Image (cartoon, rainbow, N blue to C red):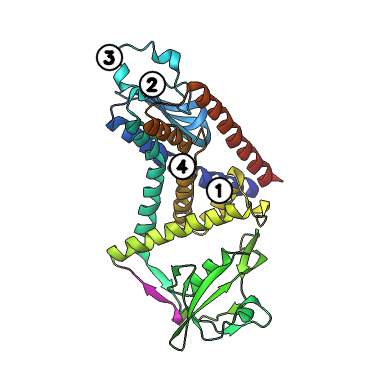
Amino acid sequence: MDFIIWLLSYIVSFLVVLTIIVFIHEMGHYLVARWNNIAIKTFSVGFGKELIGFTDKAGTRWKLSVIPLGGYVQFLGDMNAASVPDNEALEKFPKEIAPRLFANKNVWQRIAVVSAGPIANIIFTFLILYALLLGYGRYYAPATFDEIIPDTVAQSAGLQAGDEVLSIDGYQVRGFNDVQRLISTSPERPISIIVDRLGQELSFTITPKAEEVTDRFGNNIKIGRIGVRRSIEPEEYKLYKPTMVEAVGMTFEEMWFIIDRTAAFIGDFFVGRGDLEQLGGPVKIAKISGEVATLGIIALINLMALLSLNIGIFNLLPIPMLDGGHLSYYFYEAIRGKPLSQKIQDFGFRIGAFLIFSLMLFTIVNDIF
């Protein structure tokens, strides 16, 4: 019974997080499509057989489907959920319906509709992080080193006890927790550190050593370490609450940090530093969601913001089947004045489908074994 409760807590947390993110993404497509007077056939959260649903006055079928691993908005005249147009069906629609078909809209309207999904995810992330920052602020302790451990990269680079860190890799450091996360997320990657030493600014380039540690949930993860220590007393932590204007910049900085570190993580696989065990798919995301849920609702909301941003950016990749693949076709059409041939588009969709499903299969197998 305990195992079932534990398993359900993971699944429920995962489904809540994923459903909200998918709904926000698809609502972006839906709203911009409605603003452009496009006929929408289906709005689905999930794939496969419909579980529950209803049809609104505009003729759109809203439904929750059995496989909760995504969703789609299908326009009238689309062949499938990937928005591949059905050319034979398009020719059969009555003349009064033809102007409302997505395929018959001008290229800039189609670009607006397709890009609206990822943009909605990005805006959603901004609103969450901005609201949390204004509502809760951040606790900081002074970003100084108490001790430099002998025979470490920090000592070799010339860092000294008492140095106050000002920035790392161009990111402003406001407290020692910033130092920890900027270094820990850069294993085996060179980083630049600017410190204040007795009023003088000094710059160092250091490559954190990758070390495997076990987190509070028993997961083995690799983080970067340079060999410094800092003992922080509770009274050293100070709450900092930014103004509404300052919080905008801090939120964008946080979002860029997520994007930057995600891109660096992916880039590691192209230079031989990547760790396949760190890759995760639906199973791993479900596990992380369940673990984070035990830390409280705020931690789960933060995870939702991070996943929403990554899903939004991932969908902009120029891979057919993803929003970015459609946008590539449409930008080509906008530049050349005519669309790619249907044969090339169909071939691209097949390649895209193969890549996406292969990645999905790999991450699921990697998660389980």
Q: Of label 2 and label 3, which has the lower sequence position?
A: 2
Q: Amino acid at mark 1?
A: Ser
Q: Mark 3 highlights which residue?
A: 96
Callout 1 crowding tier (Cα within 10 Å): few <14, some 14–19, many ≥20: some
Q: Nearer the viewer, residue 17 or 94?
A: 94
Q: Of label 4 and label 2, which has the lower sequence position?
A: 2
Answer left or right for 44 relative to 146: left
Query: Do we see residue 49 in this rendering?
Result: no
Q: Quadrant of residue 22?
A: top left
Which residues lie in the magenta part?
A: 235-242
Q: Amino acid at mark 4?
A: Leu
Q: Of label 2 and label 1, which has the lower sequence position?
A: 1
Residue 93 disc label? none
Give the Cα separation between the discs numbered 3 and 1: 50 Å
Seen at 44% across and 43% down, the residue is 21
Local SS, label 1: helix
Q: Of label 4 and label 3, which has the lower sequence position?
A: 3
Q: Amino acid at mark 2?
A: Leu
Callout 2 crowding tier (Cα within 10 Å): few <14, some 14–19, many ≥20: many
Residue 316 disc label? 4
Residue 76 disc label? 2
Q: Nearer the viewer, mark 4 or mark 1?
A: 4
Total numbered circles: 4
Local SS, label 3: loop
